[in-house]
Amino acid sequence: MNHHFKMTNTYCGKRYGWKERLLGFALGAAPGAGIGLIMFHHPVAEVLLGLAAGAVMSRKYIAWRIAKRKLEFQSQFCDYLDALSASLSCGRNSYESFLAAGEDMRGLYRPDSAICRESERLSDALRTGGRLPELLDHMAEHSACSEVRTFGEIYTVCSKAGGNLKRIVDDTRNMMMEKMAVEEEIQTILTGPKNELNVMAVMPFVILASLRILGGSFLADDGSSLTVNLIALILFAGSYLVGRSMVAIKV
């Protein structure tokens, strides 16, 4: 599941192509070239660091956009379950309830939103004779959302053995809401450490830039200085990556 999510540039009907890649490249190339100018003061280093940073940021930016859309889908899926529960409360069967929930999503969100794309896909397949367990499994695959897969598995057992479908829908929604609340609280707590880490990562380059502005005599651009700067840059990058991994806490 995660493999599918990471290896494609498409998520829930939206594809991130060359425009997003160019934007991500620009966001990385500019600071990369700036770091090359500050630390090495050499055009070759500026170009190489700009290209390297742009290539890395191009992938990171698309991954960030997909992760953001995935978080939006999780929140939207809670509303989808809420609409599904309301339809079941009105006495509708599963077929009618899923179709009605899809209609409700089109009234709440934009047509290109993740939940509208997936609910419309499910509704269209359901009208042509698709089986709900399989359709929910497809939705879980497209969205890379473990809660959707869990809901689909529970629904399959419930439909075969019998059970209170409305309660299952409500329990799944409550579980997702609690999980998102915990994740949001963790991210709030980590906001301070993340900001401190970013400031600490930027400060060495600010100091070096200040030294170059004040006078070139502070920094020599000979071979030994370039080697020291390269080692320092590797240490800075390694420390930052270690710091990011320490504050990357997920539920």
Image (cartoon, rainbow, N blue to C red):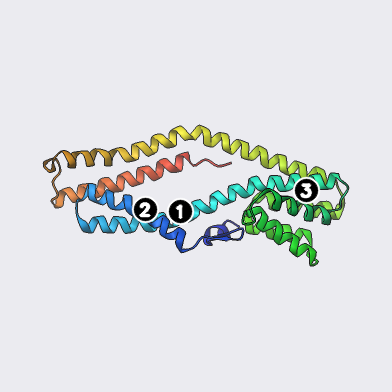
> Can residue 165 be seen?
no
Residue 49 in percent (x, y) is at 29, 55
Between residues 116 and 66, which one lies in front from this camera angle?
Answer: 116
Tell me whether the residue at label 1 lies in contact with that at label 3, contact meaning CB atoms closer than 8 angstroms: no
On residue 218, the disc is none
Mark toward the start of the polypeptide (1 vs 3)? 1
Q: Quadrant for the C terminus, please.
A: top right
Residue drawn at point x = 85 percent, y = 55 percent: 160
Q: Secondary structure at mark 3?
A: helix
On residue 28, the disc is 2
Residue linked to disc 3: 84
Vertical side of 210 occupied by 230: above or below = below
Tell me whether the residue at label 1 lies in contact with that at label 2, contact meaning CB atoms closer than 8 angstroms: yes
Q: How many marks?
A: 3
Residue drawn at point x = 86 percent, y = 45 percent: 90
Residue linked to disc 1: 61
Callout 1 crowding tier (Cα within 10 Å): few <14, some 14–19, many ≥20: many
Residue drawn at point x = 65 percent, y = 50 percent: 109
Q: Amino acid at mark 3?
A: Leu
Name of the residue lying farthest toward the bottom = 128
Residue 220 in percent (x, y) is at 13, 46
Residue 223 in percent (x, y) is at 14, 52
Vertical side of 206 occupied by 93: above or below = below
Q: Secondary structure at mark 1?
A: helix
Q: Secondary structure at mark 2?
A: helix
Between residues 124 and 223, which one lies in front from this camera angle?
Answer: 124
Callout 2 crowding tier (Cα within 10 Å): few <14, some 14–19, many ≥20: many
